[in-house]
Image (cartoon, rainbow, N blue to C red):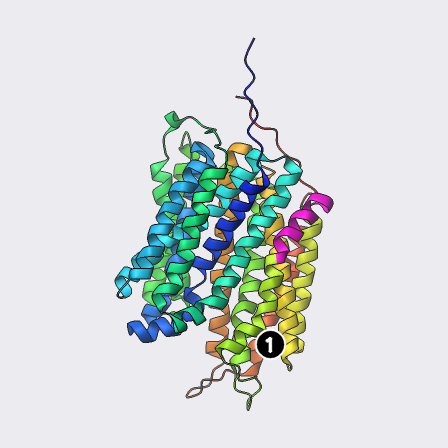
Amino acid sequence: MTATPAPPARLGKAAVGALGMLAVATGALESVVTPTLPLLQRELELSPAEGALLSIVLLITGALVTPVAGKLGDRYGGKRVLIRLMAVVCAGGLVSALAPGLPVLLLGQILQGAMVGALPLSFILVREHLPAEESKVAIGVVSGLFVGGGMAGTLSAGPVAEGLSRHWMFALPTIAVIAATALVYRLMPHDSPRRSDDAGIDWPGLLLLSGTLITLMLALALAPDIGSQPLVLGALLVLLAAFVTGWISVERRAAAPMVDPRMLARPTMWKSCVLTFVICVGTSVAVYLVPQLFAVPSHAYGFGAGATEIGFFLLPGAVAASLAGPISGIGTRRFGSRAVVSTGLVLMAVALLALAAVHTEVWHLVLGKVAISLANGLCVTAMVTGTATSVDHSDTGIATSLVLVTRVIGFAVGAQLGGAILTAATPPGSDVPAESAFVTGFVIAGAVTALSLLVARTMSKGVKECPAPTS
């Protein structure tokens, strides 16, 4: 008789809590640069270009590391890869905290970017050690806590940097990451590798995927300056096309591909990526435009809000985003992913179009931002959950990684779109864009979000859990 392998140990509340603590800590560490960028530019004497580089380098690293981490987690075990990945993140946080200038700070941010890969590894562990229905809720909780950590980092980074120093705004969340990683190591049961190490690593596929993502993020970063650097942007687009073509060709022939093209062709997979991209573009346009509208002088058509006031106005939206993950997980478990995604898309489209029509009071913007943040959390968590539970256990990490990378790209595209619209509508010699630019941005984002309902309608109503491999 063939021995039946023992079932994996079930996660206890303490282990899930440790994963949640890690999500909060990494979310906080990820978010400290954005609200303090003007302070960093003053203290380090950075040019606008250097400041822009500092603001995107973590995203570039995250987009690169996430699919690699997910793939390695599928192959060698989620806990094993997660602990090693967080060691890199902790080193990056300490380097950033001690950085005397821009070059060292950039190195720290590059290392910190590995934190984005922690989410798919957490999903591997949750799915491995919890029943299917419970895992959907747990994935939602972890996703929501990551957003909540980002909210905490955004709100606390400025006061900490001004009250203590810029060094402490990196050091404090890094200490929290170290503590949470130690708890995960102690409380999380080990998960066994699902694939043989004999298959090796698809190094050509890894290098080509890395080149594709890096080139794409650089092209997005340079897109607003296309007028001054058309040849550079054109060269990047040609290089991007070459990387994509080479990557597809290599992956089709690889015995153990980094990303199986057949998995990308599955309706659940490509629809999740398309919807995630569209939703994050709409969300990112609002994330960029709403604070800008708050800051427009009150003698024009805005509110003349300062940094502290803007943070206060954005707080309800951040709270809504942190609650959306658990709500989405429960909703997906009860009603199916299609119902949750469709609800989120309708809510987001209505909120964006409403902001285009009415934005004359602070509460208009606050309420609109709350609805958009809630809708984004509902949709993205539902799609990550649906994707995680629709593929084989051995593909959980890479599948969810692709959705999360699409999320990063969508946010980058939306931010650049919002910036380009405001730049084009700012008269020469003025710092105040025309009010019509905000209306245009909200309308474009709302229209694209509404059109994505056509894709959402073709999604399956629910997701059935794939059986675990028996060998």
Q: Residue 72: which quarter of the image?
A: top left
* Stretch in magenta: 323-336
Q: Residue at x 42, y 52 (%)?
A: 62
Judged left or right of residue 252, residue 436 is right
Horizontal relation, residue 418 to residue 380: left or right: left
Depth check: give the residue in front, 20 or 453. 20
Q: How dense is the environment of label 1, judged by Cα within 10 Å: few (below 14), some, or many (20 and up)? A: some
**x and y, in percent, of residue 317 in the image:** 60, 66
Above or below for 138 versus 393: below
Residue 7 to residue 207: above or below: above
Q: Residue at x 44, y 54 (%)?
A: 176
Residue 220 lies left or right of residue 276; in this view the side is left
Q: Position of residue 387 (x, y in %)?
A: 58, 42
Is 335 contained in the magenta span?
yes
Percent position (x, y) of residue 246? 37, 43
Q: Residue furthest top?
A: 1
Instruction: State the SS at label 1.
Output: helix
Farthest residue toward the bottom? 299
Residue beneath the point at 34% across and 39% down: 204
* Residue identified by numbered label 1: 439
**x, y percent for residue 69:** 42, 42
Say whether residue 457 is visible.
Answer: no
